Amino acid sequence: MITTTQLPVLGFAAYSGTGKTTLIEALLPKLTQAGLRIGMLKHAHHNFDVDQPGKDSYRLRKAGASQMLISSRNRYALMTETPESESEFDYLLSRFDDQKLDVILVEGCKNIAFPKIELHRAEIGKPWLYPSDDNIIAIASDSSQSDTDLPQMDINDLDAIAQFVLNYVTEITSPKSDKGSSCCDTLSPAFLSVTQGQEKILSLVDTVSDTEVCTIEQTYGRVLANDIISPVNVPQYTNSAMDGYAIRGDDLGREQYNVVAEVLAGHAYEPALELGQAVKIMTGAPTPLNGDTVIMREQAEHQENTVRFPNATIKRGQNVRQAGEDLAIGSDVFTKGCRIESAEMGMLASLGFGECPVFRKLKVAIFSTGDEVQAPGTAQQSNSIYDSNRFTIMGLLEKLGCEIIDFGILQDDEQLMVDALQSAALQADVVITSGGVSVGDADYVKLALDRLGQIDFWRINMRPGRPLAFGQINNKPFFGLPGNPVAVMVSFINFVEPALRKMQGELNWQPLKVSAIATEDLRSRQGRTEFSRGFYQFDETGRMTVRTTGKQGSGILRSMSEANCLIEISPSVDTVKVGENVTIIPLQGRI
Ligand code: AMP
Ligand code: MG
């Protein structure tokens, strides 16, 4: 479930100058008189502060309190510092006390997906929002609109607006309504945030059920289908951690010891060590019975058959690795869902496994679409571009260890698409296309999918990357990625990869995200997640910094090739200034 609050949420969207706050201020008494308990969420400029310099709370915050709760007989306020980035809208909603409210009204947050009333005044001279925003559920204006079925109210008729809000709250919260909440789940095909899109997709895909047994040398990149329990002790026997001399721990402080043997790795000195005896021992060789203490060779003076340790401070038990010290027999090593990489391969081998159970490989069908798209390796035709998306996707799938079924390039033809999509869904576990999912005249993938059903067209609040089609064909997940080459990669990284990893059996995979200092101003639009192509590096003082790779057009694949990370600017941030922190997603190992 995506919703974080059980309360109805209703926003007021308008350009500045429309008088939002004044209107809401006049509306609230009418709503409270009708018995509604109201929570308000308002987005403010990042320099805004509710506190005032000189107040105790202000001083304590500045002195380092990252949360400051101040309370009195009449109210309390919790101020939480969020220097890294503004909190997500959903998270902010979850801060309200569901038990104490009937509705949350939101002022602003124009570009976030939730139901809103659009406020519009002709004299301000701004365009309408509703034609391009499916989240607008009613309009209040000083003019009437003939091109919409949305409920309309006079912006100066506060009673009518209040009545609308009351009806809305009643409808959402009445038991016969199955909406349950007003959040974005009910709003498809509206805007979704990146996180909402990811959660929704993850909730709709399942891990393949088939498993197979692989020899260890074939397991690189595969996902374990069983827990691994250690069948042995590691190390198997107690052994020396140094090249040196083993003596008895109850026999320290002697002038000299008799060297009775030399033990190399792979061999053993069978008798028990007696008082006054030492054995010369190599790293990894088993310590003899009672020989529980090893003195390193550099501290020893070895003459003929005796050894002395004149300057050594010796502690009983030193320089010895105990049997089972790294891993005791019967202990948990890896859990089902762990992806096997180099270290895991080595570990499995170190436990003596010659093979292990893994989930079977995912079969992924891919194709490109568009009359203008031409296969590489042929002479360039007029009005065409070479297909890059299919190859980018191949690489991305290769990294994830998928089996690829390449359907090539499909012409813009509805029947061809329908046939190809159906046949792909029969052969593969997942189908991925690129291009043809926007609202252009030749977006045939969209037409074909409309016929095949069970496909949602999402406008993800992100750039680059929207639109995105996701659904099921023949019960197989389908991803319709955008056509633009950078958008393809960015959507793959954000939506396809997490889903494929889950289907492959990998549990709770999360992409690595870290924070870096921006060395240039970064702009983004409020309400949308911006993924710029970035290059991170350490500066001369050792701080992690990041810059963009230059021009960011979504067709410029070169920007992806020059990047070593994506810079993620969250929906609540519109500008990141030089010197501020920004989130980056390193791409090494992923693309
Ligand atoms: P579409 O969504 O089909 O309108 O495509 C958007 C843009 O991406 C257009 O400029 C297409 O020419 C381009 N495009 C679509 N498919 C590919 C592809 N396979 N390789 C490179 N560019 C593509
Ligand atoms: Mg196209």
Image: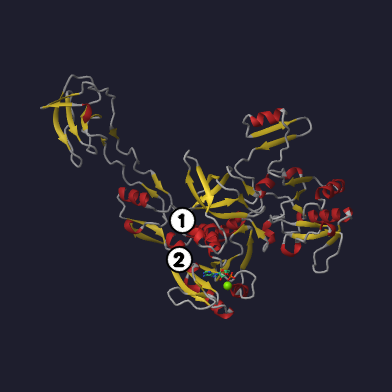
Can the viewer see residue 205 in this picture?
A: no
Tell which of 122 and 411 is nearer to you: 122
CB contact under 8 Å: marks 1 and 2? no
Can the viewer see residue 47 in this picture?
A: yes
Q: Quadrant of ligand 1?
A: bottom right
- Classify residue 438 by image quadrant: bottom right
Q: Residues within 10 Å of mark 1 (few under 14, many from 20)?
A: few
| Scheme of image coloration | secondary structure
Question: Circle 1 sits in a helix, a strand or a loop, which is it?
Answer: loop
Please provide percent x and percent y for residue 532: 56, 55
Q: In the rendered view, tell whether residue 116 sits above or below residue 150.
A: above
Please provide percent x and percent y for residue 204: 57, 61
Residue 182's mark?
Answer: none
Tell which of 529 and 431 is nearer to you: 529
Q: Residues within 10 Å of mark 2 (few under 14, many from 20)?
A: some
Q: Residue at x 22, y 19 (%)?
A: 253
Which residue in the structure is indicated by mark 2? 394
At label 1, the amino acid type is Arg
Which residue in the structure is indicated by mark 1? 590
